[in-house]
Image: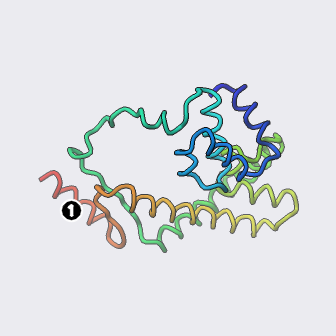
Amino acid sequence: MPAEVRAKVREGARSRPPQELHAELARIDPITASRLRPSDPQRILRALEIFAATGRSLAQLQGARTPPLLDPAACPAFFIAPSRPELFARINARFDKMIEAGALDEARALGSRGLDPLLPVMRAHGVPHLLSFFDGRMSLDEAIERGKSDTRHYAKRQVTFARHQLPGFLWLEGEDMETRTLAALEQVFA
């Protein structure tokens, strides 16, 4: 994406609500607009940027996809899902390790750059809440808990996506996943 196109689209969108941007997208790319929530400014802006840069809608560009490198019918595919309590415990522990490893310094450095809050890096799990801590809008404990909560919600959305969008995948979840995964692999490659 040319930087000048991105800057021009983002400047034009700066003071406009996402619903207004969604209506603009619906005029130029109704198919993509129908797939996006009016409250999702990041994806709406991306679709507007693509149209501004290429003159083609995102739906047109996505329709011209090349076939996958691997034939899904000839390749075993697995979705490995740990139990929800185990997954959430791992997410919480990982977030704590990130804080210990310098996530606060990283968030402070991002905040000092004056970046557009709609950029993906500024919306990364935990970043908005850590920035709120630095601005004095919440305690560090609250910022950390909200960062963990955002990450847990994201993980739940990933599982929902997998359930609906990966129907051909063998689903492995819950207890004793390692044993079940090995058994499934033996079955596929027998």
Q: Which of the pair 119/152 is nearer the observer?
A: 119
Q: Characterize the local packing of mark 1: few (<14), some (14-19) or many (20 or more) Cα atoms within 10 angstroms.
A: few
In terms of image quadrants, where is residue 55? Answer: top right
Residue at point 40%, 64% (across, down)? 81
x%, y% of residue 15?
82, 46
Looking at this view, is 172 or 161 the one in front? 161
Give the left or right position of residue 118, taking residue 73 as reference. Answer: right
Q: Secondary structure at mark 1?
A: helix
Report the front residue among 30 and 120: 30
Q: Position of residue 167 (x, y in %)?
A: 32, 58
| Residue that label 1 marks | 183
- Name the residue rendered at 69%, 66% in the picture: 146
The residue depicted at 36 percent of the width and 71 percent of the height is 174
| Residue type of the residue flagged with mark 1 | Ala
- 115 relative to 84, above or below: above
Position in image of residue 158 (x %, y %):
48, 59
Q: Residue at x 33, y 35 (%)?
A: 67
Q: Residue furthest left?
A: 190
* Quarter containing the N terminus: top right
